[in-house]
Amino acid sequence: MTTGAQSLLRTLLAGGVDVCFANPGTSEMHAVAALDAEPGMRGVLTLFEGVATGAADGYARMAGRPAATLLHLGPGLGNGIANLHNARRAGSGVVNVVGDHATSHAAFDAPLQSDIASLAGPVSGWVRHTAGPADVAADAAEAVAAARSGRVATLVLPADASWGDGAADRPAPVPAAPEPGRGNPEARSAAAAALRSGEPCLLLLGGDATRTDGLDAAGRIAAATGARVLVETFPARLERGAGVVAADRLAYLPDAATQQLAGTRHLVLVGARSPVAFFGYPGRRGDLVPEGCHVHEVAGRADAAAAALAELAADVAPDATAPVAALRRPPLPTGPLRVDTAADVVGALLPEGAIVVDEANTSGLTLPSATAGAPRHDWLCLTGGAIGWGLPAATGAAIACPDRPVWCLQADGSAMYTISALWTHAREGLDVTTVVYNNAAYAILRLELAAVGIDGSGGSAARSLLDLDRPRLDFVAVATGMGVPATRAETAEELAAALAKAAAEPGPHLVEAMVPPLVP
Amino acid sequence: MTTGAQSLLRTLLAGGVDVCFANPGTSEMHAVAALDAEPGMRGVLTLFEGVATGAADGYARMAGRPAATLLHLGPGLGNGIANLHNARRAGSGVVNVVGDHATSHAAFDAPLQSDIASLAGPVSGWVRHTAGPADVAADAAEAVAAARSGRVATLVLPADASWGDGAADRPAPVPAAPEPGRGNPEARSAAAAALRSGEPCLLLLGGDATRTDGLDAAGRIAAATGARVLVETFPARLERGAGVVAADRLAYLPDAATQQLAGTRHLVLVGARSPVAFFGYPGRRGDLVPEGCHVHEVAGRADAAAAALAELAADVAPDATAPVAALRRPPLPTGPLRVDTAADVVGALLPEGAIVVDEANTSGLTLPSATAGAPRHDWLCLTGGAIGWGLPAATGAAIACPDRPVWCLQADGSAMYTISALWTHAREGLDVTTVVYNNAAYAILRLELAAVGIDGSGGSAARSLLDLDRPRLDFVAVATGMGVPATRAETAEELAAALAKAAAEPGPHLVEAMVPPLVP
């Protein structure tokens, strides 16, 4: 007598999925109850589905294997969509389990009934509606396989498939994931020729080419050929700091990105997509590739990009060595807190082996330079642009890597989308230090208002939709209310003291960094 | 030179839509800027899209006309889906404006690109992707018409349709909404015969039959024929209190609902759907209509239900009068706060003309009886079952009815989904008094765990996913951090004092009512 819910858990566990970020409801009660029957799965309660899905994204990026979610029907999936979008753009595998009404109940169009498949499609690389208990194991195994290949795999589980018995006793074997592609050999040959030609070449790295090995290969190519190296604007996981080959990221703002790319004659894409503007703007090109520049896609996003890059390096730079970043922290600044001084404090204190979850937005402008010489660390970015990702992703990263400190560098407006993640930080005792940059504005939108061609910074009605003052949020109070110890920093000294204290104590902390907005 | 954004606002304003709940991003910057060029539209900033969509629902229920939203691309729409689901189930009209990438930018599959239409479909009764500036006025006018007929009308507006000129100078006329149906005359005749037969009849009311006129007609029919009257479980807007004909609601739990419906020989549906269980349960019927009971659908949800009911009353109860509820408040209780004493405090103090937004869930069990004799008020319910609706709906109700006090009776777990609505309460100075029932549990799920047939209350792993302790949320701190004055009540006296103080002061307040969970 094995229920579908038990069968689900057994197959997930056998497939190496042993964390479930859950925000369940009635239709998921049997899956919840099965947690006691099938020990080994860590259920992590979140207070909002967007926290669960963002946590699964952060987990996948750091663990290198998928976690599961447990969401409640269409509206619960809806709440999780924004961070599933980010996960999809990151190539993070997620076993996204969505409970549904019992099959016999669907005909009644009960209040919570909705078209789950239509909601799931845009964020999923794999969707399955399980027919009954006997199908759960095989469907779950396929979901695990899809997630292992970097996809959001949405498994819609009707309540009766969960509570019914007749399910397989044994876990279904997870189908082998296809080997990632090795990239395009012809493009690699063309890129090699270009790199040897002496013409201006630029390597743009994404996917797994932004990890140490890929960066080393890129650095060797650069050393041997003079090519420049950039990392895509929002890498899923960038390894950096002392001992790692350093590479700047392509800028977010199209003017700055255009400057970085100017003069490039050969753009070599390795795990990165061809650069485009984040948004379209009146009268401007969206494609950022310079006119007349040749694009060589050596490896796509889903390919083994680092391996392809290593082959390219073996070809064009067999004897080169790549210079790595030296350990060089900025001195601890003093005085009023600003975006730049706050970044220097982070650079001065970032611990060895830290995981940085970066949703600092405009308040993070100088973070990359300030931390370039910090001890080795990972840097996770907002891949899909859907804000409200940082606090949830930090949750998942901390659960994936319990021995590493997580620093969540978080803009204020974005923080409010999924603020309840702080409660999960507290419940799970996660070693997450959150810095909320409180500039009382959607400062990025002040930039964008100008970028789309609106004079000045808009009138008062427009302006009021971009400001977060009246009242100014008090993140110390909010965090305290969710069980996370918090302090406010008005000066660089106060920020340094608060971060040092957070690093010295176990469990989560929040520091509210009061900074003027980058755009007044 | 009229831009699409200006054309949008002109048409909305001419169509009587003058409130926009907005959470905009880059692709909506021209719409934001147009707020200064086209005064008259009140832009209300929310910090999360689910607040914007829930506010539009609450607004429509109380204003009787639609508000607009302004959401950012697919992920922003995703965040708004849960409360659009509730709006759809309530029959609340919403002009749901979703910005999209500029048309020329769509080809680039930029990071925020997604399939907006697929996300919009399940929650919308009308969807349009506007082709260009010249189409904005006509599309917006159609959206207003659809919203006026009680639908969520999703207008997807590419950024270039918004910033481009060549749009119509004048607002497009809003097509006349079709007259609501008058119901089914044959069913009405059959219902009349049944009501005259002396057999046990039950009127189940929904739609606009839950307002004063409909309740009066139902009361007259009951007085003349002995029929019983119930209101659907979660009415969108129920008028009640002293001077209004009282009617109980159909219970949420299927056992209780089955008891209420037992013995009914003729079920007369007037604006309500045939009763079904909220969820399916193992081995239980989902259809709650008693065996052998005849169902007469006199008016559907979208029909003019109150008018159909008035005709039925004119037929079977031409001379009857309906008894109305007397003013009879419970005495102010004393001692420890519990679900029942907290409800009595609300019943004792609810102001004349209050709008009650009810997402109290299990902590609201005795609220209906405790408030039945309070001065006349409106009661808004969670129509679609997607939690995280109360605080946003209260936002919209308060903006729709600035002269009426709004009492938002809010469960703790549900509150956390859209907690940032409190900030909008503060910014807009809304007369919203929020009572958060802090029982440190998803208590409803403890009930449901038992209802689906799981012995006891589950093991410790299951139990930990239903509890909100470790740490216990401190809603006073959270509210204070968002600018809403807040106090904690541990006793009935403290709750009464806090509510009296809130009623005496302008602007928002929050009272954290510490109650034991209904299910330990």
Image: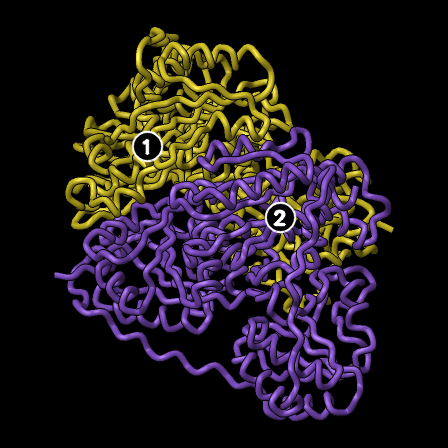
Chain colours: A purple, B yellow
Say which amino acid is labelled 1: Leu
Residue B149 — which label? none
Counting residues from the start of the chain, the first of labels 2 and 1 encountered is 2
Q: Is residue B97 above or below residue A313?
A: above
Whole-percent x, y for residue B29 in the image: 74, 49
Dot 1 falls on which chain? B
- Inspect this view and state whether residue B173 appears: yes
Picture quadrant where residue A333 is located: top right
Which amino acid does the dot numbered 2 rest on?
Leu
When the figure is inspected, residue A356 is found, relative to residue A291, above or below; the finding is above
Residue B76 image point, x, y percent: 58, 51
Q: In the image, which disc is placed on residue B204?
A: 1
The picture places residue A492, in percent across and down from the top left corner, at 68, 40
Q: Is residue B345 left or right of residue A240?
A: left
Tell me: A221 left or right of B298.
right
* Between B350 and A4, the one nearer to me in the picture: A4
Q: Residue at 36% across / 67% down in the picture?
A: A128
Residue B493, image x, y percentages: 38, 9
**Residue B71, numbered circle:** 2
Q: Quadrant of residue A163?
A: bottom left
**Residue appearing at x 74%, y 38% in the figure:** A335
**Circle 2 marks a residue in which chain?**
B
Q: Look at the numbered discs 2 and 1 and tell me whether their residues touch, using CB distance below 8 Å.
A: no
